[in-house]
Amino acid sequence: MDEKQVIVTGVRPTGDLHIANYLGAVMPLVKTLEANKEAEVFVFVADLHGLTDNDAQTISDYRLPVVKDYLALGLDKYLNSGKVHLFIQSQIGELISYLALFLSRYTTFNDLMRVPTLKEKLRVNQEAGQANALLGYYPVLMAADILIHNATIVPVGHDQLPHLEKTREFAEKFNNEFGKVFSLPQPHTTENLRILSLKGQGKMSKSHPEGALFMSDPEKTILQKIARAETAKEGEATPNLDSLLTIAAELGIGTEEFRKEHMAGKQVVGQFKKVLGETLVKFISNFQNKRSGISDREVLDVIMKGGAAARLSAEKTMERVKRAVRIDYLNN
Ligand code: TRP
């Protein structure tokens, strides 16, 4: 396959990053970049998507800090290649919106309401009396993010797969009507890490801060949270203990011995927590040090460059789209 690889992915700027975001999304993205050195890569902060169900102030608060997080977590290394572009979605907002308009011809209101990832969000927001039409439009906007760079690979979590299916459907229908304009993007899902709240309320999430390990937590808080984390009695396995073991393994701690001894009834959880706590402190404080060395000015430079590259790429696609749809009548 000698098709040029284009990787596109987005992250919503809706809260503080925690360790599960890092292990589940950022680390796999860095691995994908490492494995695809020749690819053109667009990584963006999906601020317009954030606005579907968050207020403008929240999005404004997190928009640039997320870029800094991603740089400090290892994306900085790839920027010099000239092939990896970090930008903010709204920098090319009008181009994405314009493409979304053409894609909208290939779906119906009813179909949009049936996209599984969205159904739950729509329900929750409707109950709160605030499901707006932009939320229903989420899949179209997301398809436009992806197709506007002619993406071939889209790294996403499992929950996003229905959106990718929708994206491929849009691309196929457009291509069928107008000839091959878009590549069909392949999702690259990461192995589903089950990282739970340290306090046993489902997945680790920013909405239960006491059970989440934030990348901004100070040393003392990290150690406290690990010390208080739910585990299991000797000889017993629980999802909470498994989750801690998963975090440990992802951070490079050998966990087999602990697991064996624990299952054999030995009292090793304390010792395990100590190793895990120390490793987390080291990892998170390294991140924090690196992050504090990145200036706001640098972040702006990165997104000015990234945004310009994204714009070039998006404009190129939009020229092809307009030609295909025959609305380039003034340029003939
Ligand atoms: N919907 C994604 C999420 O919630 C974010 C996103 C927006 C995205 N546009 C995208 C991801 C395009 C990949 C490609 O995580």
Image (spheres, rainbow, N blue to C red):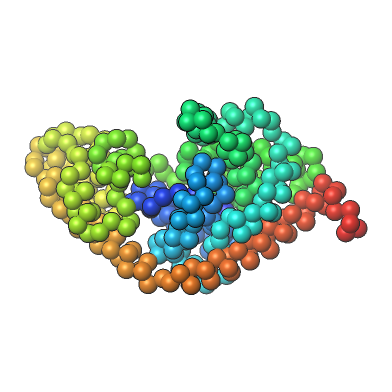
Q: Name above or below for residue 16 compared with residue 115.
A: below
Q: Residue furthest right?
A: 332
User: Residue sitting at 32 percent across and 35 percent down?
Assistant: 202
Residue 43 image point, x, y percent: 54, 57
Count of labels shown? 0
- Foreground of the two, 260 or 235: 235
Residue 9 image point, x, y percent: 54, 52
Name the image quarter holding the C terminus.
bottom right
Q: Would residue 252 appear left or right of 178 to someone viewing this image? A: left
Residue 104 image point, x, y percent: 70, 39
Q: Would residue 120 appear left or right of 281 to someone viewing this image? A: right
Q: Name above or below for residue 219 compared with residue 233.
A: below
* Displayed quadrant of residue 52: top right
- Foreground of the two, 44 or 220: 220
User: Residue sitting at 64 percent across and 29 percent down?
Assistant: 111
User: Residue sitting at 50 percent across and 33 percent down?
Assistant: 125
Residue 58 image point, x, y percent: 46, 50
Q: Would residue 210 appear left or right of 227 to someone viewing this image? A: right
User: Residue sitting at 61 percent across and 59 percent down?
Assistant: 91
Q: Would residue 111 appear left or right of 60 to someone viewing this image? A: right
- Foreground of the two, 116 or 271: 116
- Foreground of the two, 96 or 161: 96
Q: Name above or below for residue 267 compared with residue 90.
A: above
Is residue 215 shown to the viewer in this render?
yes
Is residue 156 shown to the viewer in this render?
no
